[in-house]
Image (cartoon, helix red, strand yellow):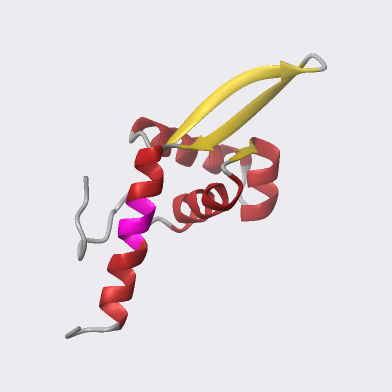
Amino acid sequence: MKTLGELDPVLHSQLRLAVVSILIGTEEADFTFLKEKTGSTSGNLSVQLEKLSGEGYISIEKTFRNKRPLTTCRITPKGIRQFEIYVKSIQAYLKPGK
């Protein structure tokens, strides 16, 4: 777990940070929604979602809707904590000496 002042390399990736930021606001989103909001390719998004899931920042559920695959991502408590630490770390960099 990262501490205040350290920038979490998992979240420091632009696409992973975008995904977590979206999930912080929505709690869950499907793959298509995340792809549209981030402007990512399917392949790149899949890789980044697996990275976030592997670190425990999000959970991924794969189901079917009308015989079509549906991938739903949810922010985890660890993901929320790490995002909050990341934001505070960025704020600390913006206000040095305080």
- Compare residues 68 and 73 and report the one nearer the observer: 73
Residue 65 in percent (x, y) is at 77, 19
Residue 72 in percent (x, y) is at 61, 30
- Compare residues 28 and 49 and report the one nearer the observer: 28
Q: Quick check: 21 left or right of 8? A: right
Determine the residue positioned at 56% across, 34% down. Answer: 73
Determine the residue positioned at 68% across, 25% down. Answer: 70
Residue 26 in percent (x, y) is at 61, 47
Quadrant for the C terminus in the image: bottom left
The count of marks equals 0
Determine the residue positioned at 46% across, 50% down. Answer: 16
Dividing the picture into quarters, in which one does residue 30 lie? top right
Task: Write down the region rendered in magenta.
Answer: 82-86
Q: Main secondary structure of the magenta part?
A: helix
Dividing the picture into quarters, in which one does residue 34 lie? top right
Residue 97 in percent (x, y) is at 17, 85
Determine the residue positioned at 62% across, 28% down. Answer: 71
Task: Residue at the far top: name it.
Answer: 67
- Residue 64 in the image: above or below residue 98: above
